[in-house]
Amino acid sequence: MNIRIITLFLIAFAANVNASTDVWQPAAGHTQIPLWPEAPPAATPVPGPEYVRTSTKPFGGKPMVTVSNVSQPTMTVYSPKGENTGAAVVVFPGGGFEILAMDLEGTEACDWLTSRGITCVLVKYRVPSLPYVAACDCRPHNRALSTPSLQDAQRTMRLVRSHAAEWKVDPHQIGVLGFSAGGFLVAEISTVFDRKLYAPVDTADKESARPDFAMLIYPGHLATDDDKANPNLPITAHVPPSFLVQAEDDYTDGVHQSLVYYAALAREHVPAEMHLYAQGGHAFGLRSTNLPINGWPALAEAWMRTIGITH
């Protein structure tokens, strides 16, 4: 990912927002569940209190709601509407590991999934989740694992499996969906799901953190500048079946991110499906763009049926 482009994007976004000091809350009828019973592991200070911003500049014809300075990660469970397929998807919004696009890449994804009979678990993971470097006054990514957010991802997967019976979820049909930096987080949890990043805190941590399937939408950090696979994402035959979507005119992350990751999956014979579109740019989410890329959710639904997640 071009960190300079991400930084400029975030600066441009900040110049077009109405700020609020409120902590992000889901819509009425839904409750945030803390991921950790006490302080998160290896908790580090954030620049200030959590706050929500709403853009004045439209994204896909509507404002975008983001949350910053998340130090207390949570998950929110959205039950399926109509017939329950038994499948569940854990959703990771993007935002360059600096902010989280909670509606564009969060609640709107849950609206889609629940309308298809799939339980959605929206994660508000810790951000910023990369170390600050004073020399550049930034948080350069360097393709390393985003440890705090990956700890949150592992913990979420284990909590969902531990509550599977209660939430009417099949513990063998729990997938992940991520956008942009959230797509990188999906790659992390898909490749290093069993890496020990924190001491167990309760019986939920006896569960597996491995997703049963994975969807990466305009992901970043998956490839080096010379189009080699990110060495921090060791792709083996144990990576779950994966679905990728990216636009060729995505100049934030670059289409090579998906191409390199897909090729690595193919070498390990991991079932994978990739869709590349001529136009779409970055951060299109599920909003109408009047472009063919707007049809990717239907392709994802067909893919989930193909691999036996839904019927």
Image: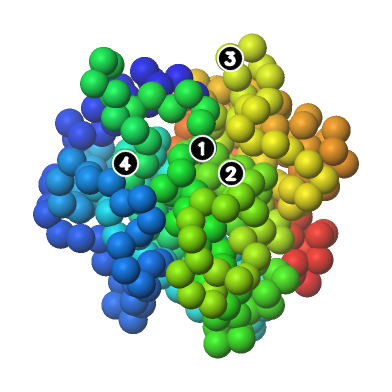
Q: Is residue 105 left or right of residue 39?
A: right
Secondary structure of residue under mark 4: loop
Q: Nearer the viewer, mark 3 or mark 2?
A: 2
Cα gap from disc 1 to disc 2, whole angstroms: 7 Å
Dot 2 surroundings within 10 Å: few (below 14), some, or many (20 or more)? many
User: Residue tagged by mark 2?
Assistant: 188
Q: Position of residue 9 (x, y in %)?
A: 32, 27
User: Residue tagged by mark 3?
Assistant: 225
Cα gap from disc 4 to disc 2, whole angstroms: 17 Å
First in sequence, mark 4 or 2: give its number.
Answer: 4
User: Residue tagged by mark 4?
Assistant: 128
Residue type for callout 4? Pro
Label of residue 145 in the image = 1
Quarter holding the C terminus is bottom right
Cα gap from disc 3 to disc 1, whole angstroms: 17 Å
Q: Nearer the viewer, residue 288 or 93?
A: 93
Residue in the image at 78% along x and 37% along y: 265
Residue type for callout 3? Asp
Asked if labels 2 and 3 touch by Cβ distance under 8 angstroms, the answer is no
Q: Position of residue 187 (x, y in %)?
A: 61, 43
Residue type for callout 1? Leu
Q: Is residue 275 left or right of residue 187?
A: right
> With respect to residue 225, does 245 lie above or below?
below
Dot 4 surroundings within 10 Å: few (below 14), some, or many (20 or more)? many
First in sequence, mark 4 or 3: give its number.
Answer: 4
Asked if labels 1 and 4 touch by Cβ distance under 8 angstroms, the answer is no
First in sequence, mark 1 or 2: give its number.
Answer: 1
